[in-house]
């Protein structure tokens, strides 16, 4: 995507939606770190699935 199009898209983007997305990512971060510490493959699979979505 071109820079101008990207800027326009971002300006039109709902800030509340971005905040919610950022909050979700922040909430997922401890899970990711915990998964790295424990090396639990199930948690890893879950985090990988969440990252794709």
Image (spheres, rainbow, N blue to C red):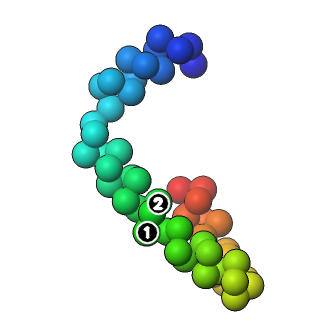
Do the CB atoms of the residues marked 1 and 2 lie less than 8 Å apart?
Answer: yes
Let me know if residue 32 appears in the view: yes
Left or right: 47 in relation to 12: right
The answer to whether one can see residue 46 in this image is no
Q: Residue at x 74, y 84 (%)?
A: 39
- Estimate the x, y position of residue 45 in percent, counting from the top left: 67, 74
The structure residue drawn at horizontal position 32% and vertical position 50%, both measured from the top left corner, is 19
State the residue position of label 1: 27
Residue 20 sits in quarter: bottom left
Vertical order, 9 against 40 (above or below): above
Q: What percent of the width, then of the height, locates residue 37?
A: 69, 83
Describe residue 43's horizontal placement relative to residue 9 as left or right: right
Q: Classify residue 15 as left or right of residue 31.
A: left
Location of residue 31 in the rendering, given as x and y in whole percent from the top left corner = 55, 76
Label 2: how many Cα within 10 Å (few below 14, some 14–19, many 20+) = few
Q: Which label sits on residue 4?
A: none
**Residue designated by label 2:** 25
State the residue at coordinates (33%, 24%). Answer: 11
Identify the image quadrant of residue 16: top left
Helix, strand or loop at label 1? It is helix
């Amino acid at each position: 995507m071109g820079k101008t199009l990207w800027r326009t898209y971002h300006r039109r983007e709902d800030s509340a939606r971005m905040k919610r997305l950022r909050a979700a990512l922040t909430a997922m971060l401890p899970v990711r770190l915990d998964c790295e510490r424990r090396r639990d493959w199930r948690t890893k699979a879950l985090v990988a699935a969440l990252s794709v979505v």
